[in-house]
Image (tube, rainbow, N blue to C red):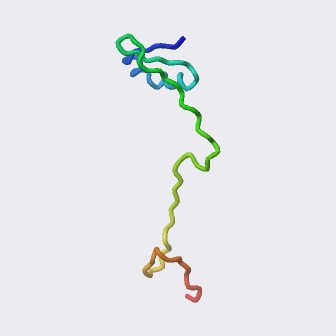
């Protein structure tokens, strides 16, 4: 049998109810005494993907004192 909570109870105990639903328990939220919503854990994400989040990288141009064009490759002059 599902555990039932009113909207007010669910609002006060939302984190607990999320934890319980994620562990497999059936949670029903009632409105005006009648069942309204059933909390259910979302399906697990696939781990076969390369990245699950955002990957960022930064590169800073070397300070050579000259103007630096970011549209071209930078190869310092070895004769300098």
Q: Residue furthest bottom?
A: 79
Q: Residue 41: percent from the left, percent from the top?
A: 54, 27
Residue 30 x %, y %: 40, 15
3 relative to 79, above or below: above
> What residue is shown at x 39% (from left), y 12% (from top)?
34
Q: How many marks?
A: 0
Question: Does 71 sit above or below residue 5?
Answer: below
Front-most of residues 19 and 47: 47
Q: Find residue 2 and report its horizontal and vertical position in percent.
A: 52, 13
In the picture, the quarter occupied by the N terminus is top right
Quarter of the image with the C terminus in it: bottom right
Instruction: Give the image quarter of residue 33.
Output: top left
Q: 75 or 30, which lies in front?
A: 30
Looking at the picture, tell me which residue is in the foreground, 45 or 75. Answer: 45
Q: Residue at x 50, y 18 (%)?
A: 27
Q: Where 61 sits versus 44, above or below?
A: below
Q: Residue at the location (56% across, 85% down)?
A: 77
At x 61% / y 50%, what residue is drawn? 50
**In this image, 22 relative to 66: left or right?**
right
Would residue 32 be found to the left or right of residue 37 on screen? left
Q: Residue furthest right?
A: 48
């Amino acid at each position: 049998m599902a555990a039932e909570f009113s909207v007010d109870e669910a609002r006060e105990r939302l984190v607990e109810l999320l934890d319980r639903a994620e562990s497999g328990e059936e949670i029903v939220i009632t409105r005006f005494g009648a069942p309204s919503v059933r909390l259910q854990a979302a399906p697990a994400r696939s781990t076969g993907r390369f990245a699950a989040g955002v990957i960022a990288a930064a590169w800073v141009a070397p300070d050579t004192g000259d103007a630096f064009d970011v549209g071209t490759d930078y190869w310092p002059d070895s004769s300098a």
